[in-house]
Image: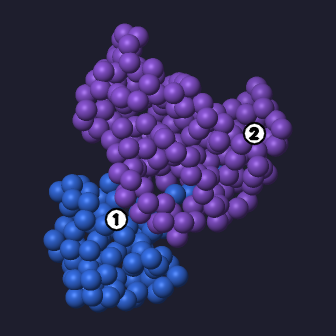
Chain colours: A blue, B purple
Amino acid sequence: MSATVSIPTILRTHTGGEKQVKADGSTLQEVITDLEANHPGIKDRLVTDGALHRFVNVYVNDEDVRFAGGLDAQVPEGGTVTILPAVAGGR
Amino acid sequence: MVAGLVGDDADGLSRRAFRILDAVLVIRADLVDEMVAHARRDHPLEACGQLTGPEGSDRAERYIPMTNTDAVSSDYAFDSREQLRVHRESEERGEEPVVVFHSHTRAPRRPLTDTGLPEAYPSEKDIQYMGLQPGVHFVIVALTGPDSGTDLRSFLLDEAGGVVEDEVAVVENYMFAHTGSDDVPDPGARS
């Protein structure tokens, strides 16, 4: 199962500047494990204590995985995983 | 000041690296008006949005108001699904975020400013999130009411994570907003 992963500017240091990379896996967890194998260090930027970091938004196709099972979200064959910086602030 | 170097190369990366040393936000007046109008409309809640422009240009062209899903007077968060839609649309147009905007509406009990306005300065939480978008300007509009005065300031983070305030230059259009040492339009710019 192969997915296309869209990488935000801040994480492209891990992908040699690539905007999009391929990764294998049928769940988001597996995709991130495969990403880490090819782009060491990227997992720590996405996952803390077994959950997605609050500073990133991760989408499988059009769905924010926070509303679709988090790391257990299913990634269909040929699916797209998009990572964006979360945008928030306040006191 | 060596601001004349800004815009002298076509390489967005070096331009960005340079801008950190001498931070400038050149922005069209109509885009400033849109941000301020949005801040007034949503007061007392914080308003938020983004300005996109051609990749690597550091030039904001479009204001995109965003839905604040953390709608209280002291916090904001982009609606994540809306953010994905805007991201895809921007990519198709060859654009990227140049500015992230939000308003500060809550005046502290003990005024920190001479004007009595909330401080248009990034909070600790603001700074944590700014760190995710190096090179993006974060504009804050402070106001106390829909008809009050406003204070607009712009910031970005340097490589060490320190807050740098932009010098904000509001212009009617970008054609003559060349920040070089002479007063002629950039020869590369065509209308």
Q: Label 1 belongs to which residue?
A: A45
Q: Is residue A18 visible in the rendered structure shown here?
A: yes
Q: Label 2 belongs to which residue?
A: B143
Q: Residue at x 22, y 83 (%)?
A: A2
Q: Secondary structure at mark 2?
A: strand
Q: Quadrant of residue B98?
A: top left
Position of residue B16 relative to residue B132, above or below, is above
Position of residue A67 relative to residue B189, above or below, is below
Give how far across and how far down residue B45 sits, in percent.
Answer: 75, 54
In-image side of B127 versus B4 (left or right): right
Q: Residues within 10 Å of mark 1 (few under 14, many from 20)?
A: some
Please tell me which residue lies in front, B159 or B61. B61
Q: Answer yes or no: do the residues labelled 1 and 2 have beta carbons within 8 Å?
A: no
Label 2 chain ID: B
Q: Residue at x 76, y 26 (%)?
A: B114
The quarter of the rendered structure image containing the N terminus of chain B is top left
Q: Amino acid at mark 2?
A: Leu
Q: Residue at x 71, y 46 (%)?
A: B39
- Depth-wise, is mark 1 or mark 2 nearer the camera? 2
Position of residue B67 relative to residue B171, above or below, is below
